[in-house]
Image (spheres, rainbow, N blue to C red):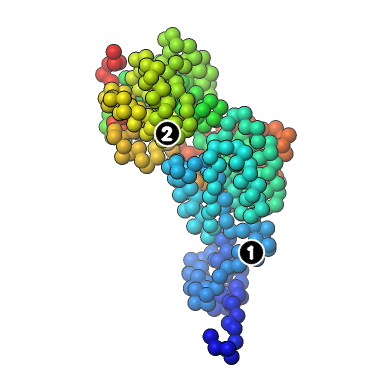
Amino acid sequence: MSETEPARTAATLHDVAREAGVSLATASRSLNGSTRKVNDEYRQRVLAAAARLNYTTNLSAQAVARGATTTVALLVADIADPYFSSIASGVIAAADEANLIVTMAATDRDPDRELDLVRQLRGQRPRVMILSASRPADDPTADALVAELAAYERSGGHVVIISRNELGFRTVPLDNRGGAEALARTLVGLGYRRFAAVTGDEGLRGADDRLEGFRAGLAGAGGGAAGVPAGADASVDAGASAGADASRASADAGADASGADAGAALPDSRIARAAFTRDGGYAAMQELLGRGLGGAELVFAANDVMAVGALAAIRDAGLAPGRDLAVAGFDDIPTVRDVTPPLTTVRVPLEELGRRALRLALGEDSAGGVTGGADSAGGTAGAADSARPEREADPGPALEVIVRDSTPPLASPRP
């Protein structure tokens, strides 16, 4: 540009609206992530006009005007875990549809870190915060976390929790107990009677729910469940096999029946706990092998990444997974379809969980969100001393038991 050439003024939203031949409101909704639908023809005209004029949305000005940015904050426990990356994929897909941008942070399953991240994010004023991480039952930061999230909602933000509703905010629930119970019934139907388990550290809510549900399913099946056809990806609907009510009713009985070694399908002596990771699964499986499996025919891993670690430990011990010792997991992350042998598991619609979480936050989902501790005016029971809500009755998205080669049918119990 020459010294005499005047500086070019940056295009404004008014310029874009005029260029596209639409109203200012339509131009704003097309560019700024509004949840209100815009006619696709108008939206394309606005986007084309913005490109011609080199218009860039002023995110800082939007944040001041709205009290929030066009970002979605997603907190996960471990971004390297395909469970959480699949949920993130669903959140990102839904955010793209709403012209929003997702920022992500990992809590490393550390409640103090999660609380610090929420505090930092409040200062960045995201439009939505989605929390997807299993918390310890005795979380010392729970009250402080609720207070931070409630303050964020009072300032205009939207909070959604994935899986558990113990914090009192809108939730996309996941029936971990019911899914694990359905898996146990299916495995009994395949002929298995003696089980071991590798699971997360005691007190981790998601892991505990799955172990309790699995034990309840074994107690309820009693060896009389109907068989399931063999073959890759044979499936059983978890809701049909084990309803939420049956899961709740039999959970206590299952835990009692399984607590002692004598005559138990899954005695305490055949349970090993470790980190809820692939390496944790490997270490826990090594621990079980070192103790002696006590005749166990099948190992239940409380998530698929632990199952992958368990498969490796079984191989390293000179055994053949599926043939010498069956293995089942939970989640159906993409990896387990390609491991050898392909893993029997409970299919969780992970991407759909992410999509539903964002749609619920934006007020677009009516198919499974649960509002815990919210009053009719939209406020939350967010004070640190408020009562926690009862567990939601809605079981959330349907789960499926997927039977693959890691659990071949047994004609008779192994000796």
Nearer-the-camera pick, 185 or 166: 166
Q: Amino acid at mark 2?
A: Asp
Residue at 68 percent across and 58 percent down: it is 67
Give the residue at the far bottom of this rendering. 4
Please state, as top left, top right, bottom left or bottom right, where the C terminus lies in the image: top left
Give the residue at the far top of this rendering. 262
- Mark 2: few, some, or many residues within 10 Å (few <14, many ≥20)? some
The circle drawn on residue 187 is none
* Residue 51 coordinates in the image, percent (x, y): 49, 73
Nearer-the-camera pick, 295 or 182: 295
Name the residue tied to disc 1. 60
Q: Quadrant of residue 301?
A: top left
Q: How many discs appear?
A: 2
As helix, strand or loop, the secondary structure at mark 1 comes to helix
Name the residue tied to disc 2. 279
Residue at 37 percent across and 42 percent down: it is 334
| C-alpha distance separating marks 2 and 1 | 43 Å
* Residue 251 coordinates in the image, percent (x, y): 51, 21
In the image, residue 299 sits, relative to residue 102, either above or below, namely above
For residue 128, say whether it is visible: yes
Relative side of 42 to 195, left or right: right
* Residue 119 coordinates in the image, percent (x, y): 66, 47
Q: Earlier in the sequence, mark 2 or mark 1?
A: 1
Residue at 47 percent across and 25 percent down: it is 273
Residue at 50 percent across and 23 percent down: it is 212
As helix, strand or loop, the secondary structure at mark 2 comes to helix
- Mark 1: few, some, or many residues within 10 Å (few <14, many ≥20)? few
Circle nearer the viewer, 2 or 1: 2
